[in-house]
Image: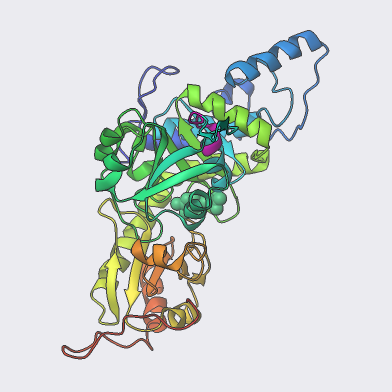
Amino acid sequence: MDTATTGAYDGVRTAPRALATEAVHAGRDDLARQGLHAPPIDLSTTYPSYDSRAEAARIDAFATDGADPDGPPVYGRLGNPTVARFETALARLEGTESAVAFASGMAALSAVLLALPHSRPRSSGGTSMAAGLRHVVAVRPLYGCSDHLLTAGLLGTEVTWTDPAGITDALRPDTGLVMVESPANPTLAELDLRAVAHVCGPVPLLADNTFATPVLQRPAAHGARFVLHSATKYLGGHGDVLAGVVACDEEFAGRLRQIRFATGGVLHPLAGYLLLRGLSTLPVRVRAASANAAELARRLAADPRVARVHYPRIGGAMIAFEVYGDPHEVVSRVRLVTPAVSLGSVDTLIQHPASISHRIVDADDRRGAGVSDRLLRLSVGLEDVDDLWADLDQALCAAPERPVAGSAARDTAGTGTA
Ligand SMILES: *Cc1c(COP(=O)(O)O)cnc(C)c1O
């Protein structure tokens, strides 16, 4: 996939360029003309203007369609040139017109939910309520906090959970969004994005592409209108930036910029710089970490202490696996691998989703979505694969092996996750 050329959107350049080339050059097209090599970091919060009539016109224009103002950004909450470089580059990689960056993946998802049109107000006993709920159809599993945000209805959404086959029946006239992840966090369950986009019809589909990255999959090409990333993960790639981004058409991007302006979930310019830098090695990192992960998945699948291994058909650097023994023991015994939540960094991390990343999801809902109490999630990094295996092997050491036929398999995890 990394040799594919990028982008349905070709408004800026003429010859399509390969993903690896875009990863290094997109968002930097003007630098040589400016006599620069590394992109500058613009830390300005405000921008001087002696012409307040022109500034008023720029603010009016932003209020109309959320387009990036011509000229300086007025104020840091409207936009930032360094962050804009990352947005331009990510849009190129995902093949969308635009992208809008936020302070975190959750801020990005929140902005999408807030930007959805309200359904018609419902009337109750003659008085009509201020605003209708926004109806969302979603497929589990999702990242734990995304699940929580929808389930709790914190942003005035009402959610119908379903499996991919049930989407058609779950859609209502007032459905504003269908949300999926593929491969999903943490089980790595995959779904056919093209088929899902087809059944959504006119209802926009949001695909969380955090796990696959545009190196392995570009959901917009399959019909997703919104592509969400926790840029904290592979896009940043070094565990030192918290960020989110939505790749989409320019019309929706304008709405997202207006929401970002009004709610304030902006990305810091230094984070924008680090993300642009992260993108330049994204294809190389994802390919190398995926090769490690594929090999570790193979060794885990052959190991008698491991009950199940989930590794996506499209590949990637994430593995989920279930052990016969106590998963907490494995987490406590790793030495080279870091026991920590999050993923997508150059180093390998392991965590127990039922205790950490998906703790906030109701236990029955979590198990119903295939997140067993025995599941461990491994984010494979760029270390030597034999060193990684040696560490996993010793961490699994105490785990019991596959039960012999006839004896009952233990089907509950160790303590502490109830
Ligand atoms: C981490 C994650 C998020 C949330 O992103 P933050 O940057 O932590 O706010 C959303 N979706 C997926 C799939 C994630 O892994």
Q: Is residue 229 above or below residue 412?
A: above
For the point 37% across and 28% down, the residue is 7
Q: Is residue 39 visible?
A: no
Q: Where residue 172 sits in the image (x, y, percent)?
A: 36, 36
Res. 80 image quadrant: top right
Q: Is residue 172 above or below residue 403?
A: above
Q: Main secondary structure of the magenta part?
A: loop
Res. 365 image quadrant: bottom left
| Residue placed furthest toward the left | 405
Q: Where residue 183 sits in the image (x, y, percent)?
A: 34, 52
| Residue placed furthest toward the front | 125
Q: Nearer the viewer, residue 400 or 113?
A: 113
| Residue stretch in magenta | 113-120
**Is residue 394 a member of the stretch shown in magenta?**
no
Left or right of 87 in this view: 311: left
| Quadrant where the image shows the N terminus | top left
Q: Where residue 187 sits in the image (x, y, percent)?
A: 35, 61
> How many numbered marks, from 0 up?
0
For the point 30% across and 37% down, the residue is 3
Q: Nearer the viewer, residue 197 or 336?
A: 197
Res. 2 image quadrant: top left
Q: Is residue 156 above or below residue 77?
A: below
Q: Nearer the viewer, residue 206 or 136?
A: 136
